[in-house]
Image (tube, rainbow, N blue to C red):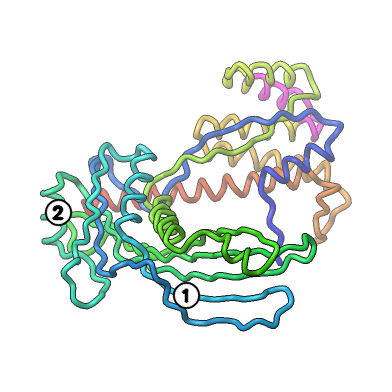
Amino acid sequence: MAKSYSLAFVSLFLLLFGSCQSIEQISIDYLQPADLSFPPQLRKVAIVNNTSNAPNDKLTPQTKKSKGNRVEISRAIAYANGDPKVAAEAMAEEIAHQNYFDEVVICDSALRANDKISRESTLSQEEVRQLASDLGVDLIIALENLQFKITKTVRYLEEFGCYQGAIDAKVYPTVSVYLPERSKPMATIRLNDSIFWEDFGISPTEAAAQIIPTKDMLKEAAEFAGTVPVKYIVPIWKNGKRYLYTGGSVPMRDAAIYVRENSWDEAYELWNQAYQSTKNEKKKMRAALNIAVYYEMKDSLAKAEEWATTAQQHARKTELKKNTGNNKINTDEAPNYFYISLYLTELKERNAQLSKLKLQMSRFNDDF
């Protein structure tokens, strides 16, 4: 299994093993760009239900594993149509919560309710224009399809001497974005994600009985499915943890006070002074990383990436002196380098995504 480390985990690692350096944690809220971008004139959106699959409270079993496994007592897999009305309402609520559009309208009644045969069909340009006019919106986001794969298991947890009943629901929502001026969808997004429930008992029967009832599970799964596409459609606010070096010199300590007072420009001046006034690689590394966080707080991701790269270079010189060639980096010996590298990777990904969206926006405005 491949290892992955979050910045929070590595930051904790840094705190535990960097006892000789002073570090302070701060929270940062930043806007995570979506995969799609819209020009500013599109301010009103309607969420519509464009499915023809009728939901029900019954699962269609497909496979079942017989008893005999000492750990896994039973496994059953079934499929179901999700409730598109519930999913569309959840999607509209989540999009409205992000405060990206000025107005979010919900039309959760099935546009294809009279279909005799279940199908996945995009809206025609005439349908989009009519809907946009009737609802008074600039664009349409349509839920086109919603399928579930439900896996129900009962396992014996030997270390706890009890049984676990669990349901893993994999949701498959399909969503299209329509503009009245276009004959085809601006984008169609087919996604999948999972939501999980578990409960416990002293017997397999009790563990299975404790799990969420099917009707409630299908409703919660539909609500979850409606929220899954949102981060691909609109920017969402995320909260992250950042760490600042606060020791090593008087300017660094004074800068920490300015940060607590939310005076970031004054803190930057002291970090820049600390960086310029020393030749010590470790002190330069600390000041450079703090400056990178400063620029991230200012939403200047290109400058943040530039300073994080500088901090990484200084960390390399101080912590990787014995590491040559392609030797594996030991995090015990290079905690600062390891943390800064992960932080730099995150900045590069965000910066690249932002550049991509700016290019998409430019092309979109040319076509609009």
Residue 310 included in the magenta stretch of the image: no
In-front residue for pair 79/211 = 211
**Looking at the image, can residue 188 be seen?**
yes
Q: Position of residue 214 (x, y in %)?
A: 46, 64
Q: Residue 119 falls in which quadrant of the image?
A: bottom left
Q: Residue at left 54%, top 31%?
A: 297
Say above or below: 130 vs 105: below
Q: In which quarter of the image is the N terminus?
A: bottom right
Secondary structure, mark 1, is strand
Judged by its main secondary structure, the magenta piece is helix
Query: What amino acid does circle 2 point to?
Result: Leu
- Magenta-highlighted residues: 269-283
In-front residue for pair 314/166 = 166
Q: Nearer the viewer, mark 2 or mark 1?
A: 1
Q: Where is residue 269 in the image (x, y as percent from the top left)?
A: 63, 20
In-front residue for pair 278/213 = 213
Say above or below: 177 vs 354: below
Q: Position of residue 344 (x, y in %)?
A: 63, 45
Q: Where is residue 355 in the image (x, y as percent from the top left)?
A: 44, 48
> How many dots with numbers?
2
Residue 273 included in the magenta stretch of the image: yes
Query: What amino acid does circle 1 point to?
Result: Ala
Check residue 78 in the rendering and tell me which mark sits there, or answer none.
1
Query: In screen coordinates, is 355 left or right of 138?
Result: right
Q: Residue at left 30%, top 40%?
A: 101
Kindly give the residue lying farthest to the right in the view shown. Answer: 322
Query: In screen coordinates, is 1 left or right of 47?
Result: right
Where does label 2 land, which residue?
131
How far is disc 2 from disc 1 in space, using C-alphas? Answer: 36 Å
